[in-house]
């Protein structure tokens, strides 16, 4: 195997670039690798011959700007792309790399430029994670005048077809049953054909609130190499209006470094992960969470080895069954399930707005500047770090958006831009379906609406908040409280069809007219003042 056209490392950018001698400039096949497909398990790489293939990687305007992506997300992807380009070069591939400074407008434009240089005869692409891009790519064959093959993304544990087969004929698509089938299929945490420990799900053990019971292990900061430093400086200059404080950039940008993060998690945080999975802590944005979704979603980690590593930790007695099961349920269950649901229901899923939520997003969603302490902390860390854990996304930010009736598309775009693990296949079902109930209950069996009491139970934010979680009306009342009852009251008709809401609705109806009126009036006042909360 010989690379006819040697790759050379440019001093200026630290990138692998082709040596553009005309005699060398042709390849049979091009592979376009997207920024979230940086995996050796990529279906086109699996069948590629480096001698006849050119791999295209491109940092392009359209992908970087179709929502207001967090600068952490852009820097993570660009640096990981540049590192992967290097690794491809080391394995003998010719790489056509277009850095952001080249001002390439779109992925199609990058393929056109590469075609001029490499005169390839067919283009292989792994299907993208967003419907918007899939639709575009289906027209690329005409635009480029050559065959474009869209390959199935084999990096997931359930294919789109697997999910459709599972879904067909079912009235309800509940995650729990999908998850059990996946456990059996992959033999994870199984004892012959029975679930390890006799139960499928240890969710009830995963709900302890945070009362500073133990020390939260400190995370180390990965050291940045020249490539990452160059990318950070470029992103800071090129995206001045995007959120993200890059002085705190702490993310792994190679397979090896991402694996080291997973190893650290298994060693230090996994044992307490199960217990505090639903906790909210004033003193830490990370608690005992994995911080691996950003790597799984861009190809730096693969889901099966991740689950196997966590199971191995349980088998050697390093963590409890509830910790291992709680974690594997997220990766093998929820992650695969939301992807299946997305492709099963797109494109109309994106248009759903079952509760007619249209209120514009308050400006403080982009600054975190609100006196609601739990919400301010969750927003600020989301904007600054590109990360919030699940309960912050669901029960602090998402819950507020749900009970205040914030615009579904605006909230979805916010989530898609702000988080460094966000791609529409995973963001949309979680936001539109799970958090906002805008799919009318396809994903969640009841809305995840809660008052300040839940947030107080799960964490320690309320102690230092200017609002009082026990009060429902009045200047000091926690805004979550009246807004919660306003939500219950305004969706009374729809919610009364849901047997799981009976108790709450019954309790609300039993209250005196005066009492209810006072709460609703205060909620109206709160909504009028939403910009000032
Ligand atoms: P851990 O708590 O350590 O969990 C382990 C892993 O399980 C995660 O890395 C992730 O890969 C997987 N996982 C857990 N829950 C889910 C879930 N509901 N859906 C898919 N995977 C899950 N996750 C994303 O990857 N991208 C998103 O854009 C995204 N948007 C979300 C929006 C909302 C409104 C909500 C409620 C959840 C969203 N999630 C999203 C799911 C979840 O919050 C994140 O995966 C998790 O917080 C990532 O942090 P972690 O790696 O520390 O997770
Ligand atoms: C998110 C993202 C960003 C910010 N930039 C790029 C890019 O410049 N080049 C690229 O190939 N991919 C990028 N991505 C990831 C894509 O948006 C992602 O592949 C699609 O949204 C499909 O999931
Ligand atoms: Fe959040 Fe309400 Fe508690 Fe303040 S009082 S931290 S707004 S739940």
Image: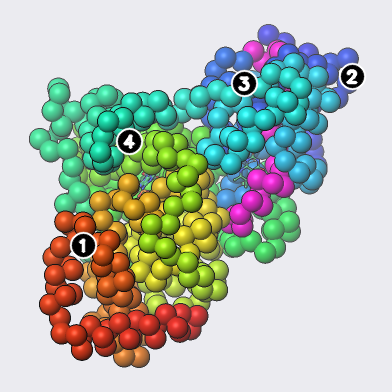
Q: In the rendered structure, which disc, 2 or 4, sits on the residue that comes first in sequence? A: 2
Residue underneath mark 3:
149
Which corner quadrant of the image does residue 253 belong to?
A: top right
C-beta proximity under 8 Å, tags 1 and 4 = no
Residue visible at 33% across and 63% down in the picture? 395
Q: Which label lies toward us, 1 or 4?
A: 1
Q: In the rendered structure, which disc, 3 or 4, sits on the residue that comes first in sequence? A: 3
Q: In the rendered structure, which disc, 1 or 3, sits on the residue that comes first in sequence? A: 3
Which corner quadrant of the image does residue 24 belong to?
A: top right
Q: Which mark is residue 330?
A: none
Gap between marks 1 and 4 measured at Cα:
33 Å
Residue underneath mark 2:
22
Q: Residue furthest top?
A: 1
Residue underneath mark 1:
496
C-beta proximity under 8 Å, tags 3 and 2 = no
> Where's residue 107, x and y in %?
70, 37
Q: Which label lies toward us, 3 or 4?
A: 3
Q: Quadrant of the C terminus?
A: bottom left
Gap between marks 3 and 4 measured at Cα:
28 Å
Q: Is residue 1 magenta?
A: no
Q: Does the closest atom of ligand 2 sit within 8 Å of the Cβ of label 3? A: no
* SS class, disc 3: strand
Which corner quadrant of the image does residue 523 belong to?
A: bottom left
* SS class, disc 2: helix
Residue underneath mark 4:
332
Task: Say which of 235 and 247 sits in front.
Answer: 235
Q: In the rendered structure, which disc, 3 or 2, sits on the residue that comes first in sequence? A: 2
Residue visible at 76% across and 44% down in the picture? 105
Q: Does the closest atom of ligand 1 sit within 8 Å of the Cβ of label 4? A: no
Q: Is residue 54 above or below residue 104?
A: above
Q: Residue furthest right?
A: 22
Q: Which residues are magenta?
A: 49-71
């Amino acid at each position: 195997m010989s690379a006819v056209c040697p790759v050379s490392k440019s001093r200026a950018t630290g990138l692998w670039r082709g040596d553009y001698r005309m005699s060398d400039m042709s390849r049979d096949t091009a592979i376009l690798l997207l920024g979230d497909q940086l995996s050796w398990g990529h279906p086109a790489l699996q069948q590629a011959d480096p001698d006849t293939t050119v791999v295209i990687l491109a940092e392009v305007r359209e992908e970087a700007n179709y929502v207001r992506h967090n600068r952490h997300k852009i820097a993570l992807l660009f640096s990981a792309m540049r590192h992967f380009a290097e690794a491809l070069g080391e394995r003998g591939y010719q790489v056509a790399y277009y850095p952001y400074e080249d001002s390439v407008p779109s992925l199609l434009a990058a393929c056109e430029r590469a075609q001029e240089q490499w005169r390839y005869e067919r283009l292989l692409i792994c299907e993208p994670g967003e419907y918007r891009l899939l639709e575009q790519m289906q027209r690329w064959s005409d635009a480029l005048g050559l065959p474009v093959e869209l390959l199935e993304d084999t990096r997931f544990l359930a294919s789109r077809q697997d999910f459709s087969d599972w879904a067909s004929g079912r009235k309800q698509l509940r995650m729990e049953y999908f998850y059990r089938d996946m456990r059996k299929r992959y033999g994870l945490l199984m004892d012959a054909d029975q679930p390890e420990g006799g139960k499928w799900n240890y969710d009830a053990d995963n709900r302890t609130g945070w009362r500073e019971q133990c020390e939260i292990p400190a995370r180390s900061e990965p050291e940045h190499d020249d490539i990452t430093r160059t990318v950070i400086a470029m992103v800071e200059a090129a995206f001045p209006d995007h959120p993200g404080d890059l002085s705190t950039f702490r993310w792994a940008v190679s397979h090896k470094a991402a694996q080291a993060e997973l190893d650290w998690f298994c060693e230090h945080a996994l044992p307490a992960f199960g217990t505090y999975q639903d906790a909210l802590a004033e003193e830490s944005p990370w608690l005992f969470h994995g911080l691996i979704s950003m790597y799984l979603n861009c190809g730096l980690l693969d889901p099966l080895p991740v689950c196997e590593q966590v199971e191995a930790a349980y088998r050697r007695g390093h963590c409890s069954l509830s910790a291992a099961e709680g974690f594997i349920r997220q990766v093998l269950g929820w992650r695969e399930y939301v992807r299946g649901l997305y492709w099963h229901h797109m494109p109309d899923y994106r248009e759903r707005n079952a509760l007619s939520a249209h209120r514009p997003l308050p400006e403080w969603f982009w600054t975190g500047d609100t006196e609601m302490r739990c919400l301010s902390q969750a927003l600020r860390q989301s904007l600054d770090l590109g990360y919030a854990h699940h309960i912050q996304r669901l029960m602090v930010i998402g819950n507020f958006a749900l009970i205040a009736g914030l615009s579904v598309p605006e909230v979805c775009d916010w989530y898609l831009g702000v988080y460094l693990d966000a791609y529409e296949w995973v963001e949309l079902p979680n936001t539109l379906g799970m958090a906002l109930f805008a799919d009318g209950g396809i994903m969640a069996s009841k809305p995840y609406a809660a008052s300040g009491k839940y947030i107080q139970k799960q964490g320690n934010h309320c102690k230092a908040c200017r609002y009082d979680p026990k009060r429902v009306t009045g200047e000091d009342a926690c805004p979550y409280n009246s807004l919660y009852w306003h939500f219950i009251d305004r969706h009374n008709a729809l919610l009364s069809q849901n047997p799981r809401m009976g108790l709450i609705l019954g309790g609300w109806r039993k209250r005196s007219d005066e009492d209810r009126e006072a709460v609703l009036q205060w909620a109206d006042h709160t909504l009028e003042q939403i910009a000032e909360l």
